[in-house]
Amino acid sequence: MHLPLLFVLSVLLVLCLLAMEGRAGDERVAIGTPPPEGVIEVVDLGGIGCSLVELNDGSLMLVRGEDYLLSTDEGVTWSEPQPFAEGLSGNGITRLASGALALTGGPGGWLSEDEGKTWSPMAEPFPRMMGKPPAGLGDEMIQLSSGRLVWPRHVGFGGRHPELLYEDVSAYGVWRGQRVQTEGHGHLPEIYVTLVSYSDDEGQTWKLAEGNHGNVNALMGWFDAEGLPTGYAGVTGCGEATVAETQNGRILLFARPTVNRIVSSYSADAGESWSAVLPAALANSISPPRLRRIPSTGDLMCVWNQVSAEEIRRGYRRGRLSVAISRDSGETWENFKTIEVSEGLDDVDRVPADYPIKLVRARDDVGQLPDGFGYFHYANVCFARDKAYIMYSRGAPSLGIAEQNLHKQEQVLRIYPLEWLYS
Amino acid sequence: MAMTGKPAFRKPAPEGVVEHVGLGKGEGTAMVELDDGSLMLLAGSDYLISTDGGQTWGEPQPLNCEAMGASGGVSCIRLQSGTLALAHRGKEDAGRGTEEYGWNPFYLSVSEDEGRNWSGAWPMKLLGGPYYDAMMQLSSGRLLMPSRICFSNNQHPGLEYERASSYGYWKGLRVQISGHYHYPEIDIAAVSYSDDDGQTWQRCQGQLMGWFDAEGIPNGRAGVTAVDEPNVAECADGRVMMLARSTVGRLVQSYSEDGGENWAPILPSDLASSYSPPRLRRIPSSGDLLCVWNQVSRDEIRRGYRRGRLSSAISKDNGASWEDFKTIGVTTGIEDVDRIPPQYPITPVIAMPELGTLPDDCATFDYANVWFVGDKVHLMYDRSWIEADEDAQQAVTLGERHGTANKPGETVLRIYPLEWFYS
């Protein structure tokens, strides 16, 4: 054999082995899409379950459960984590019209009149059920321009049958020679319905959106495969909801479905009643979207797992994290961009929403997965000055299935100039 | 207000069957045999005594259960220990602020003196609330109480209850016939159990919901469907069978092989039904199962007759098949047949929005209960009809509208020889 070629091949082989060794030994796997020029990425500081707000002194406060961090340089560098007082925690932080800060999470929230130094509890917005409050995406509460607080959360139910055990019915693939579980959601009975609570006194008292006879009005999918609200295709999930006030004075609600699109509802009366839940024109898997109003423009921004039915079937339900803008209160979406994409998927900006609109899940055996198989999910977006702070979680099979081990996954904070979203 | 009279019912009590009208109040009614051979019939917050096997009944006496609140949904059985057990609501006003979203929590009280005094009031920790008189004791001594929680939204713009309901014309007057599931609605079931005669309770693994497709395969391809007003009975082979109300044109069922802790996926049964409650009982003398329910075809449901036929059937093979179909009550407008074959597709079916002209003798028969006393079967059910408020020129509905205090109807108690159901 030609000696120089053999040498080159040997070096390459060693490099590959080293690279694989490094990957296999270290759970940090190089996956996803590097940030574009001008975008700062901070890893393992904050991601899933985080939120940030600008303080009066111009610094940023990032909350991440039981502690928080501060930045005086728009998020490039951060302080050491500071613990909240015992019993205090939150994954949402919002500046209210009154000037107070609202820290939200757990059963309710807390208010601070002194930029986060001291906190007093808000009333709980939801009744507890089976001893715990309804669940949510985190950082779900918003304030309308009227001053009203609106807070969506969900109640979920799941089947646990000897014939349909989670481990048995999950989808599996092969990644670097190992059999790995890729998803379980969608493979066994599951339903979640959204409830909305609102407050006109900045959280001192709350009222649930109610129907006749004082029944709580819940939001659930009740549409058929064409998206018509007929009930003929049973009930589908509407959970991990996220809401935003739109320019036309409504509230738009986006939620995690059990079908292959984001599901959506709107309120034309400030959250007291809601339209029938319908599929949006945004392709999605059984994964939570995040909807925000961009403060400086009033447009809407959505970050979500934009994947086609076939991509879901192949095991990539959270393999693409996308962003889009709506300038018409959610009627149409544009400026589609891909923030992250897994190896194995096309790096495209837009994936058309599929028909029929129904449950789509991975095949039981999704086969061989590429080395760079990744998932990107549970995004939050916060705005400060001219920046969008996108926080999410990034994982690979070495870190476990996407719906487990969330704390093990890589936590990502990316700081995008707002104009990037519109470019 | 001038009312027309009630119709001539097509199925009078057969020869040898005693019929009482107006005893008790349908839902919330239970019956136990006392030590002295007399019968105690619970009726709301009262009870009545019969010392002649139900031929005649005494005046209502108040039930001396201090802890009992609203009377709906009670169960009362005699335990193997000889104690009487009463499952009842507590006195707290559930409102929306309780753990169970508007369901008053249930408690188990016991009587050691044949129903004169009740004590205990142990919390049952049910999921939502139970169907009335659904508590039972397995031969092992374990108590089982199935229950369900319901979520709905009958105020979506365009899908409001009144607007989405089905209407017909009766003697020229417009009348609402049905509304349930004409808007998003879901019921999720669970089973609670106690191994210490009701002092402490646990709940089964997971929750129960329909997750089958139009062919009845549990694959999630057709959304989630209701498991409402569940009943359980111990089969001759030791399993526990559940039968429940659903939206899919059939009753739905599940089995437990371990005394109610784990349940098989919910599947459609072979019993055609509307979205109306069945009553499932084990016949003590034979170990066979007896079901009494609204046996109607998909077409009859579409035509507005969802509770127009009350049927019974026997299963001698633990619910695998049913025989000895009989019609107890049937309205004018549908055929007087004993058997309606179960149909496909197994998907939600509701009445058409406009039902046209309804027969003058239109009636419904529903919410049946069954008790066994010696060789007699005590069958109690409600029957309703339409009357005209001629002053207001409107029909008084036989629909399910809440708070319709003047809904024309009556509770019927029939005492059948057991062999009638086998003949």
Image: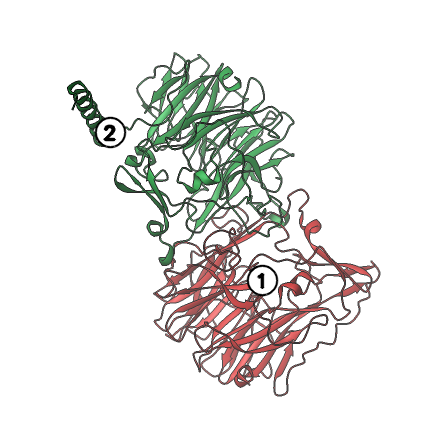
Chain colours: A green, B red
Percent x, y of residue B203? 39, 57
The number of numbered badges drawn on the structure is 2
> In the figure, residue A376 lies in which quadrant?
top left
Chain ID, mark 2: A
Q: A194 or A164, which lies in front?
A: A164
Percent x, y of residue A274? 61, 39
Between the C-alphas of marks 2 and 1, the distance is 55 Å
Q: A143 or B224, which lies in front?
A: B224
Q: Is residue B125 above or below residue A334?
A: below
The amino acid beneath tag 1 is Gly
Q: B24 or B242, which lies in front?
A: B242
Tell me, yes or no, if residue B58 can be seen here: no
The amino acid beneath tag 2 is Arg
Judging by the rendered image, the residue that carries numbered circle 1 is B249
Chain ID, mark 1: B
Element type at marker 2?
helix
The residue shown at (60%, 83%) is B56
Percent x, y of residue B245? 54, 62
> In the figure, residue B118 lies in which quadrant?
bottom left
Please name which of the two marks, 2 or 1, marks the residue nearer to the observer: 2
Judging by the rendered image, the residue that carries numbered circle 2 is A23
> In the figure, residue A267 lies in which quadrant?
top right
